[in-house]
Image (cartoon, grey):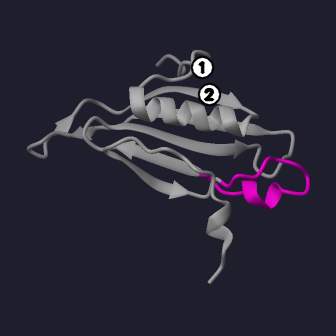
Amino acid sequence: MSETWRRLQPLRVAPGWRIDMNSLYAVDPSPETMEWFYGSVLVSGHLAHDGLCFDVRWEPEGDPEGCYEVDFLRLAGVGRKGSPTGEPACLGTWTTRSRPALVTALEEFMFSGRQPADVKAPPAR
């Protein structure tokens, strides 16, 4: 069995959150490590009862000069009786080149619901 899983980035996950996709490795971007940064989503998680969600990707894909892009979302949650709660909405997008800053932002969002201060608001409709 492959030992690649041992290189996954440690991430503290708040109660109730589910990590849906995880191919975020504890590897920093460089021309030699770009193979670790391919994929439409590197890590994704959601909180089912209120619909908070995040998706992380590297953009431009395969470019060592790129950055992590995080979409913070609110999906339609599911209430205790199975009924939808709220409307889906993009809460904003945040970028960073720092893996430690990314991990801190994701953990903060999962535990407090707060996004980084410099999140770009979604375009007005």
Image quadrant assignment for residue 75: top left
Q: Residue at x 82, y 55 (%)?
A: 34
**Residue at 74% over, 34% down:** 98
Inspect the magenta stretch and tell me whether residue 34 lies in it. Answer: yes
Magenta-drawn segment: 25-42
Side of 83 relative to 103 (left or right): left
Question: In this image, 105 relative to 88: left or right?
Answer: right
Q: Position of residue 54 (x, y in %)?
A: 49, 39
Q: Residues within 10 Å of mark 1 (few under 14, many from 20)?
A: few
Q: Position of residue 120 (x, y in %)?
A: 60, 19
Q: Amino acid under label 2?
A: Trp
The residue under the point 58% across, 28% down is 93
Q: Are marks 1 and 2 in contact (CB under 8 Å)?
A: yes
Q: Which residue is mark 2?
A: 94
Instruction: Give the label on residue 120, or none.
Output: 1
Q: Is residue 116 above or below residue 95?
A: above
Q: Position of residue 7 (x, y in %)?
A: 68, 61
At horizontal 70% and vertical 39% (from top left) the residue drawn is 99
Q: Residue furthest bottom?
A: 1
* Dot 1 amino acid type: Lys
